[in-house]
């Protein structure tokens, strides 16, 4: 295996890099898609192997500084699109056959540490939370959405038990004065929630996660991204996904398990496989986690889970059951401000 230790010096150390490379095997060459370029950790590592090409996407135009460096270094072996991965099938020609497609979900350290963007509890600025190419900001969400929708967002996207109290305090507060800063939001959450000293996470974590998912339409992005990736993969190609919270993982697990030849039978009386429903081969429902060294040295990796799947030979079909299964999330993300 190549020495990739220099990549540890990047602003965002790519989570489970060694494991990603082990699955996608760039040493064999091929065409790879990095759907979440960030500061380019995976793209860089893949391109350090000869006979590889990378098409990278990121919705955040602030990635441009890293894109320029990569273009200089790798020339036409590297192509970048400032696009959302839900648009994969529009930015990549449908006849392109891809070896591996990688999704490293969530935020980069670059985004979290830029306090102007409002992703961090420590931010003093506006509640923005837009990753890029958005139609609304967190500020618009907090000041305009109805009480019930706010409650549902916190309950379903944040799995927040005290969703109703937080949502009603948001509405009470904004009736006096619009919510204009991250400290305004953090104070509302603090006032609304009972302290649970056993919980290790910040009291605002679930609220921030929920609003961020809504602002960036992350459920729609993930579902469309996975479907489009499946369309573009060649037989034997891999989809690799790294998730950071249970909603993302639930979605990925359902897709991989339900459209795989090895899906477990609900009952032994059901037929073993339904030929029409096979997109992937030999999915073992295996989760790969970072090792203790990585968790110690890169704290955000502690909640990461890697799953991957291998495309089978059957023709692509639109997996409508996938969307149906998560319809309640998609409907919620579509509610208007
Ligand atoms: C965890 S970071 C990826 C870090 C990257 N692997 C690296 O090594 O630097 C996630 C990145 O994905 C981008 N992103 C998130 N959702 C996206 C989407 N739907 N489409 C395109 N990019 C997205 C974010 O803007 C962010 O830069």
Image: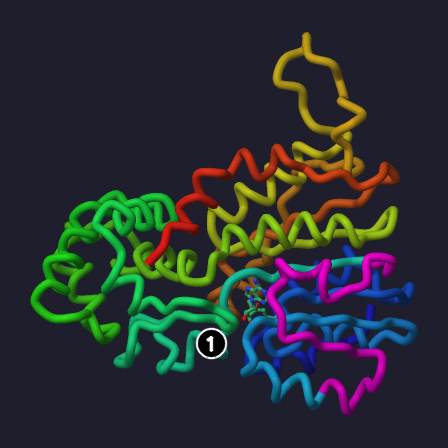
Residue 147 appears left or right of 271: left
Using the image, determine if residue 230 lies above or below residue 2. Answer: above
Ligand 1 sits in quadrant: bottom right
Asked if one can make out residue 224 in the rendered structure from this viewpoint, the answer is: yes
Counting from the top left corner in percent of width and height, residue 262 is at 75, 29
Give the extent of the magenta segment. 70-98
Q: Nearer the viewer, residue 3 or 135?
A: 135
Residue 122 appears left or right of 113: left
Residue topped by disc 1? 111
Counting from the top left corner in percent of width and height, residue 180 is at 22, 75
Residue at 63% from the left image edge and 62% from the top image edge: 85
Q: Nearer the viewer, residue 234 or 217?
A: 217
Under tag 1, what secondary structure?
A: helix
Q: Nearer the viewer, residue 204 or 325?
A: 325
Counting from the top left corner in percent of width and height, residue 1 is at 82, 68
Residue at 86% from the left image edge and 51% from the top image edge: 234
Q: Residues within 10 Å of mark 1 (few under 14, many from 20)?
A: many
Asked if one can make out residue 99 in the rendered structure from this viewpoint, the answer is: no
Residue 279 appears left or right of 170: right
Distance from mark 1 CB to nearest ligand 1 atom below 8 Å: yes
């Amino acid at each position: 295996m190549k020495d990739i230790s220099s990549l540890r010096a990047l602003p965002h150390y790519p989570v489970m890099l060694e494991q990603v490379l082990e699955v996608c095997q760039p040493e064999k060459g091929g065409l790879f898609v990095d759907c979440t370029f960030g500061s380019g950790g995976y793209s860089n590592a893949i391109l350090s192997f000869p006979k590889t090409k990378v098409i990278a996407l990121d919705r955040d135009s602030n990635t441009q500084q890293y894109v320029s460096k990569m273009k200089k270094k790798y020339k036409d072996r590297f192509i970048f699109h400032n696009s959302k991965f839900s648009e994969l099938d529009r930015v990549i020609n449908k006849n392109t056959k891809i070896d591996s497609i990688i999704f490293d979900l969530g935020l980069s350290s670059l985004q979290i540490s830029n306090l102007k963007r409002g992703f961090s509890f420590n931010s003093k600025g506006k509640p923005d939370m837009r990753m890029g190419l958005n139609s609304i900001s967190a500020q618009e969400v907090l000041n305009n959405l109805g009480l019930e929708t706010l409650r549902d967002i916190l309950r379903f996207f944040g799995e927040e038990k005290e969703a109703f109290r937080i949502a009603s305090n948001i509405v009470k507060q904004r009736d006096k004065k619009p919510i204009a800063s991250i400290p305004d939001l953090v104070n509302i959450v603090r006032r609304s929630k009972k302290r649970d000293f056993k919980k290790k996470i910040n009291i605002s974590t679930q609220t921030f996660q929920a609003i961020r998912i809504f602002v960036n339409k992350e459920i729609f992005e993930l579902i469309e991204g996975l479907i489009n990736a499946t369309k573009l993969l060649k037989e034997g190609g891999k989809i690799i996904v790294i998730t950071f919270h249970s909603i993302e993982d639930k979605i990925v697990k359902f897709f991989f398990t339900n459209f795989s030849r090895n899906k477990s039978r609900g009952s032994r009386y059901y037929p073993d496989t339904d030929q029409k429903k096979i997109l992937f081969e030999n999915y073992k429902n295996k989760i790969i986690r970072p090792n203790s060294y990585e968790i110690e040295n890169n704290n955000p990796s502690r909640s990461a889970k890697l799953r991957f799947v291998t495309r089978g030979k059957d023709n692509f079909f639109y997996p409508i059951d996938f969307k149906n299964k998560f319809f309640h999330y998609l409907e919620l993300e579509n509610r208007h401000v």
